[in-house]
Image (tube, grey):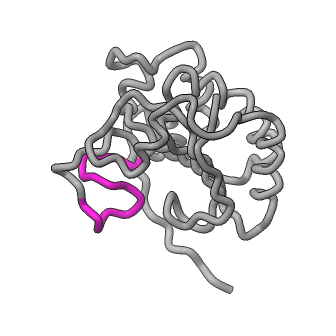
Amino acid sequence: MNYAELKKNDIANGPGVRVSLFVSGCLHHCEDCFNEIAWDFAYGKEFNEDVWEIIFSAVNYPRIRGLSLLGGEPFEVKNQRGLLPFMRRFREKFPDKDVWCYSGFTYEELTGKIESRAFCDATEELLSYMDILVDGKFEKEKRNIMLRFRGSENQRIIDLKRTRESGEIVLWEYDEPTYN
């Protein structure tokens, strides 16, 4: 698996200051995609254990709230298999950091409720390491720059922990930061 970009101090892709990993490879090809260069699976650099260590070091500060996974498409099967061992280790090292993932696939497609090319042997475990899923393809005609942490009105911000607990989709509610 390759990655297109790594941002160590990102405030655009989830609440607080985050580390954001943009994986390479996406077959959705949404019109007006903000990261079209990352459609190519071969774009960027190899996502290897050296990069894992860079991410672990970048996340290991109290001011960093968590990790965001974007793309490309993290849930393309090749990318799932590349991310899974990393996410196992990430969760061992940082159980209190939150993980956001942006996917053009819907929650229903990722959980196998709707048939999808994304649903594979790695999907369920990979989802288990995530706290928030921003799901759905970017739709140009539903673009709305006033939305928090997403680009189009069809996309949902799903609280995966509460969704798993309730068995029904629970949307994320923004928690205002507190400052000391």
Q: Position of residue 119 (x, y in %)?
A: 46, 18
Work out which residue is located at the far left of the displayed protein and give it.
141
Q: Position of residue 57 (x, y in %)?
A: 83, 55
Image position of 155 (left or right of 122): left
Is residue 83 a member of the stretch shown in magenta? no
Image position of 150 (left or right of 21): left
Q: Quadrant of the C terminus?
A: bottom right
> Residue at horizontal 49%, vertical 32%?
40
Q: Position of residue 63 (x, y in %)?
A: 72, 70
Secondary structure character of the magenta stretch overall:
loop
Near-viewer residue (148 or 166): 148
As drawn, 130 above or below 116:
below
From this viewpoint, is residue 162 visible?
no
From this viewpoint, is residue 136 visible?
yes
As drawn, 21 above or below 103:
below
> Residue at horizontal 34%, vertical 15%?
115
> Residue at horizontal 40%, vertical 43%?
36
Q: Give the residues in magenta.
A: 144-157
Rendering quarter of residue 46: top right
Near-viewer residue (163 or 67): 67
Image position of 114 (left or right of 126): left
Is residue 147 a member of the stretch shown in magenta? yes
Q: Position of residue 132 (x, y in %)?
A: 51, 46
